[in-house]
Image (cartoon, helix red, strand yellow):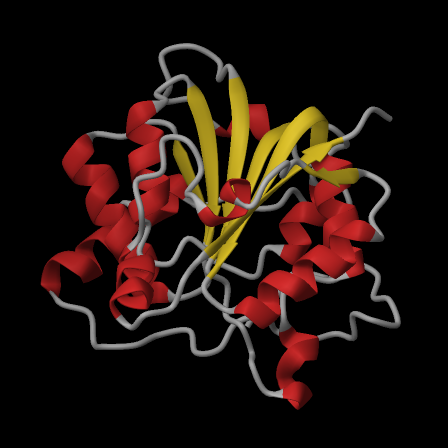
Amino acid sequence: MDTDTPGPQTAEEPERAFFGRRKGKRLRGQQERRLADLLPALRVALPPGDRPLDPRSLFPAMAAPPDAIWMEIGFGGGEHLAAQAEAHPGIGIIGAEPFVNGVVKLLAAIEARGLRNVRIRDEDVTALLARLPDACLERVYLLYPDPWPKRRQRKRRFVSEASLAEIGRVLKEGGLFRFASDIDDYAGWTLARAARCPALRWTARSARDWTQPFPGWPGTRYEAKALEAGRRPTYLEFVRLPR
């Protein structure tokens, strides 16, 4: 459970966890080792008090200061995040994922590929977003989030007017928020709330723009399972409007 102080709640966003279980199958020896030895050096810790966190300061292992900062919220097994980090070594990428088994999968990819531009927040991302300064990120990904399909569960969906306002706040002008889901109801839910967010504008001009993956898309294991099951993903992209 996130031990950080959560940000202010809205009527639509009561205090809640956006994720389910924290741990799945029992970890094996190498996984336990990476969790104990590698994660502490990569974990994003929040400054004491209410001080903001400068995300550019998180990447001392990079050869030069990052050209830009991206964030992936709920990176699952880390396939997309690791692929993007390898393809863009000059970009600093923050991944937020509370599921321990997903974290160890990303740690394995970081170790195998020698990635120096990844940092991990292994807690609920809400407190981290609240500490980031305005206009500090160039890109935010939310890919295949837990749909919480039952009506009584929908308050646990990450996308809300409050969370989109936070994403809009931390994105730079022209920055991108990319969302993917194989659940039509969640795609519609996101579009409805984004339409009420004055900071974001949907970039689609034709149906192809939301039925085709984003440029440079490496795919994810969850997406492959969805396609195999006959579910068609939706890819939504929003741009941060001028302040």
| Residue 104 in sight in this render | yes
Q: In this view, does 53 lie above or below 49?
A: above
Residue 93 locus on image (x, y percent):
46, 34
Q: In this view, does 134 lie above or below 208?
A: above
Q: In terms of image quadrants, where is residue 82?
A: top left
Q: In this view, does 92 lie above or below 236?
A: above
Q: Is residue 187 above or below residue 21?
A: above
- The residue drawn where x is 85% and y is 53% is 196
- The residue drawn where x is 70% and y is 56% is 191
163 or 123: which is nearer to us?
163
148 or 85: which is nearer to us?
148
| Residue 49 in sight in this render | no
* Residue ranking furthest to the top: 64
Number of numbered discs visible in the structure rendering: 0
Residue 215 locus on image (x, y percent):
41, 31
47 or 231: which is nearer to us?
231
* Residue ranking furthest to the left: 29
Judged left or right of residue 162, residue 145 is left
- The residue drawn where x is 43% and y is 39% is 119
Residue 98 locus on image (x, y percent):
46, 63
Judged left or right of residue 210, residue 14 is right
Judged left or right of residue 105, residue 189 is right
56 or 32: which is nearer to us?
56
Residue 111 locus on image (x, y percent):
19, 39
- The residue drawn where x is 79% and y is 58% is 161
Judged left or right of residue 177, residue 60 is left
Q: Quadrant of the C terminus?
A: top right
Q: Quadrant of the N terminus?
A: bottom right
